[in-house]
Structures are given as C-alpha cells and as structure tokens.
Amino acid sequence: TIPTTKSSVSLLHYDTTRIKENYDMKAYVITIMSHQGSLETSWRCIESGKKHGLDIERFEAYTPDNDPLDFLENEGIPKEGFTEKYSRNLNCIAAFCSHYSLWKKSVELNEEILIFEHDAVLVDKIVSNYNLVCTFGKPSYGNFKQPMSIGTSPLTHKRYFGGAHAYGVKPQGAKLLIERAKIDGGPTDTFLHLDRFDFLEEYYPWPAEARDNFTTIQNVNGCLAKHNYNEDYEISDV
C-alpha cells in the first residue's frame, strides 16, 4: 500500500465561494513542438477551449531528447518508479517532467493552473470548485466507475486518474505533488492516486475527454486498454 499524504482539507464540505468559471484561469496544453500530430491535436484543444470560454496556451513538452533523467536527478526525483510494462521509459519520464514543470509554475505564480495533454478536447465549460487537485477528464482507458453526483466530488472513477489529459491544480495542491514526487514519482496518471493523495477530486459530468489516435508515451501493452485504440492507432516516435 502506498503511504497516504494527509491533508487537513475536508472532502465533505464544498464552499460555494470557491466557484470560479474558466474565463480567468490559466490553462496550458502540453505540446511536442517537433511532432506534427501533437501540434495539430493541441491546436484542436485550444480551439475547443475557445468554444467554452477558456484561453489555452501551448506549453512546450519535454521529450527524450531533453535528457529527462537529468531532470529527475536535478529535482531529486527517484527514477525507479517509472519502470513499468505499459510505457516507453524515457517517454514516460519526459511526460512526467512536463506535468511536474507545470506544477512548479502553479507554485511560482501562486495561481491555479489547468493542465491539458495535446489530445484533450473540451466538450463543456470548466467550473473551478475544488480544493487542491481535480480531474475534469473522462477516463480514457480501462474500466471505470461513473460518479453518482453532479459537480465536484471525491475521485470516484478509479483510485487514480484514468488519464492525466485534463485536470486542475491549485498552488497548495501542486506543492504537495512536487514534495511527494521526490519520494516516489512515477507515470503521471497513476502517480495521482488516492493512496498518495487522499484529497483528489473529480468534476462530473466530465467537461473534457481524450480524442487520441496516436501515443508518444505508451508501448503496445499500454495501448490495448485505451478506449480509442484500433488497428490504425499509431505508436509514435519522438
């Protein structure tokens, strides 16, 4: 069992004064600037944001060419947690570095940040009414549970994020993610696990979803459970 990060935040009370619609939230879509598919899908993400009142900026992704192992060493993050059978190791680490860098940005700016992966598409407006870290994305792989309530609630669909393609972090939450990464960092979606962070939340109905036809992270084993996987699905090199 993963030791849990304890939080003083109660998940039984939602203060409506925290509600903020997405017009004034900072939002970034992680984009591999050297990859045509990433450029095209991130632009689609940006355009979907405009339709729902959200201005999304591109954030240049880390790739294996950016020496992600050096990044982990400089940040004091152990590399062992990234060894698993579903992803290409350096690609997985590079993706985590991108997310981690945006967590740091939230802390440095002392502002809430919405984080999207390039294949995310908004299908509704995002409303910020959560405590620390909240997913807005429909799970993109495997089996999952449907939340039984509308709005923000404790993470329900899995015990971890069923994809890190659309979520929000507030500075205090981002700080907790950064601190824990230095103990047992790992693939971003499964790192965001209730056994580590008992304060994780989700918003339902999910206002974002992944529309993916390629991956720059997973290997064949990691693609089989994807809801959008088919014979034309591309495992792309970066």
Image (tube, grey):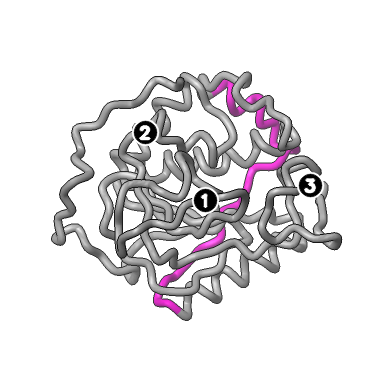
Relative to 228, does residue 68 appear above or below in the rendering? above
Identity, as a three-letter code, of the amino acid under mark 2: Phe
Residue 73 is a magenta residue: yes
Q: What element carries label 1?
A: loop
Q: Disc 1 or 2, which lies upstream in sequence?
A: 1
Residue 6 is a magenta residue: no
Q: Disc 3 or 1, which lies upstream in sequence?
A: 1
Query: Which residue is tagged 2?
Result: 197
Kindly identify which numbered label has been placed on residue 144: 1
Q: What element carries label 3?
A: loop
Identity, as a three-letter code, of the amino acid under mark 1: Phe
Q: Is mark 2 on a helix, strand or loop?
A: loop
Image location (x, y in percent) of residue 154: 32, 47
Residue closer to the observer: 118 or 13: 13
Q: Quadrant of residue 70?
A: top right
Which residue range is magenta in the image? 52-74
Query: Which residue is tagged 3?
Result: 238
Relative to 21, does residue 166 appear above or below in the rendering? above
Kindly identify which numbered label has been placed on residue 76: none
From this viewpoint, is residue 109 visible?
Answer: no
Could you tell me which residue is drawn at 19 percent across and 32 percent down? 8
Identity, as a three-letter code, of the amino acid under mark 3: Val
Relative to 234, does residue 110 appear above or below in the rendering? above
Disc 3 vs disc 1: Cβ atoms closer than 8 Å? no
Q: Disc 3 or 2, which lies upstream in sequence?
A: 2
Relative to 233, does residue 158 appear above or below in the rendering? above
